Image: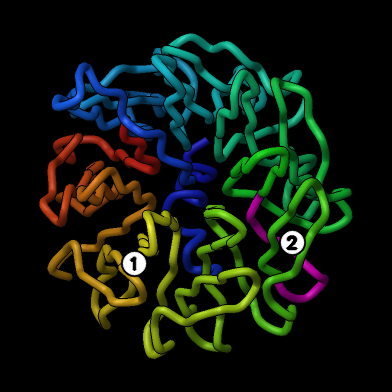
Amino acid sequence: MKKRLLFRSILFVLLTVSLFSCEKDSTTDSNTKPSASVYVAGYELNGPGYVAKIWKNGVSTNLTDGTKNAAASSVFVSGSDVYVAGYESNGTKDVAKVWKNGVSTIILSDGAENTYASSVFVSGSDVYAAGIEITGTSGTGYTAIVKVWKNGVSANLTDGTLPADAFSVFVSGTDVYAAGYEFNGTKNVAKVWKNGVATNLTDGTKNAAAFSVFVSGSDVYVAGSESNGTENIAKIWKNGASTNLTDGANTASARSVFVSGSDVYVAGFAFNGNRYVAKIWKNGVSTNLTDGTKNAYAFSVFVSGSDVHVAGIERSGIDYAAKIWKNGVATNLTDGTNEAAAVSVFVK
């Protein structure tokens, strides 16, 4: 479903996938560390349909065969196992699922309604995913229920009375957090759910959304955006208290947050008056990843040691190419011949 893909990857930002905890690298001896591998989840148009993909160190593997639309939205590595969340069409409906080591392992819905998994997180032997189930279509009784699945069993975070969405899940100890938004009848309210209980991050007077949640110790960080009435402001919340990353002169959005030690990294993008620029903020100070001559968006950040990895897209000709930046240096994952996106990065 092309419109759905574009909605989640690009167009939804004008309204206003997950990052995860880092495991320490094992060592082969006291002096030698194995090289970290970089995993990226996303999708690419291939003929008639979108293909869900994962890249490991720049080498791509298709998770689907391209005969039906699909997309990968989130990647998490636990031990030697690689988990990817996303969806694949069954020909009639889009079905949320989790792939483990390239195999469609956990089917999150029965295919009766459209469902989408936006984020995956593994804690011990438990696999969590967050996303939505959609019933109907807009204008004809459309509803969207926010869900968190644990090992394939779903729990509803909203009742479907009003549209809502979840874009990120994070597990800390026995606590399960999700970030997203819910419509209040007039505006979208940025929310974080902890163990199913919602906390509003915004007051509902202006449109807002939360795209990423990260827990460090007792602190809960959320990245997202809120409208100032005319433009969207990139924001981060720490324990519910917000900080603006942009001044609201031009629209912007914070899409991913990662905490490493005392440093807080946020990936996102901002309009420069002519084009969207992919950006990263470290402790509130921004750095441009692109020069602003072509539209570009950063969707995901992961910090490993001293290396900062960012996944996103940049316009290449008439389509978008999937890209990854390491310490600000870009590598193309696709050549721009077909529309593609890199939406989640994990390093292990």
- Distance from Cα at disc 1 to Cα at disc 2: 23 Å
First of labels 1, 2 by sequence position:
2
Question: The residue tagged with tag 1: helix, strand or loop?
Answer: strand
Q: Main secondary structure of the magenta part?
A: strand
Determine if the magenta segment contains residue 187. Answer: yes
Residue 302: x, y in percent? 34, 47
Going by the image, does 24 lie left or right of 38?
Answer: right
Going by the image, does 208 lie left or right of 306?
Answer: right
Residue 172 is drawn in which quadrant? top right
Residue 268: x, y in percent? 37, 63
Question: Three-letter amino acid code at disc 2?
Answer: Glu
Relative height, residue 112 to residue 325 (above, below): above
- Residue that mark 2 sits on: 182
- Neighbour class for label 1 at 10 Å: few (<14), some, many (≥20)? many
Query: Which label belongs to residue 289?
Result: none
Residue 164: x, y in percent? 73, 55
Relative height, residue 302 to residue 62 (above, below): below
Question: The residue tagged with tag 2: helix, strand or loop?
Answer: strand
Identity of the residue drawn at 27% across and 83% down? 273
* Disc 1 + disc 2, Cβ < 8 Å: no
Identity of the residue drawn at 39% across and 15% down? 80
- Residue that mark 1 sits on: 269
The part of the chain drawn in magenta is 178-188
Going by the image, does 115 lie left or right of 257?
Answer: right
Residue 109: x, y in percent? 73, 23
